[in-house]
Image: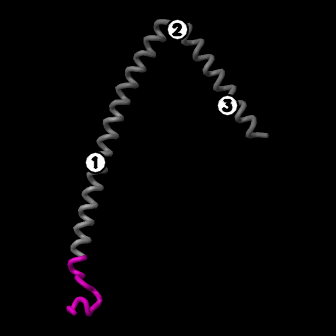
Amino acid sequence: MSIDEQSGFPESMENGEEQAGESENGESRFRAAASRAVRAGKSAAQRWGRQSRVVAGNAKDRIQDDPVRSVVISFAVGLTLGALIGRLSGRQCQ
């Protein structure tokens, strides 16, 4: 029986060193994963920004091409949303 086994702490120094190495490895994997997530988020935000500019440009062109139709559609959407909100708020009061 070795001295470490008699004390009840077998190979305590080696286990501590292994745990420290595992902790550093886990930390580096976490940092790498976080970095990948940030890069993916940035690229998605840039892609959505480009798409929204295209959609806004298309909407602007459609409004200029047919303004009466745009006003009628906006009125219908506003009326529908107003009726829906009014109905929902009326149910909450009762």
Give the labeled residue for mark 1.
35
**What's the amino acid at mark 3?**
Ile
Q: CA distance from mark 1 to mark 2?
A: 47 Å
Q: Is residue 30 above or below residue 17?
A: above
Left or right: where 18 falls relative to 66: left
Left or right: where 32 falls relative to 58: left
Q: Quadrant of residue 3?
A: bottom left
x, y percent for residue 90: 75, 35
Q: Per the image, is 82 magenta? A: no
Which residue is more in the foreground, 28 or 86?
28
Quarter placement of the C terminus:
top right
Task: Tell me which residue sits at (46%, 11%) in the image.
Answer: 62
Left or right: where 10 falls relative to 56: left
Task: Tell me which residue sits at (26%, 51%) in the image.
Answer: 32
Q: Earlier along the polypeptide chain: callout 1 or callout 3?
A: 1
Task: Tell me which residue sits at (27%, 92%) in the image.
Answer: 7
What number is the disc on residue 94?
none
The magenta span reads: 1-15
Q: Quadrant of residue 59?
A: top left
Mark 1: which secondary structure? Answer: helix
Image depth: mark 1 or mark 2 in front = 1
Instruction: Check whether the beta carbons of the residues at disc 2 and disc 3 lie within 8 A of each other.
Output: no
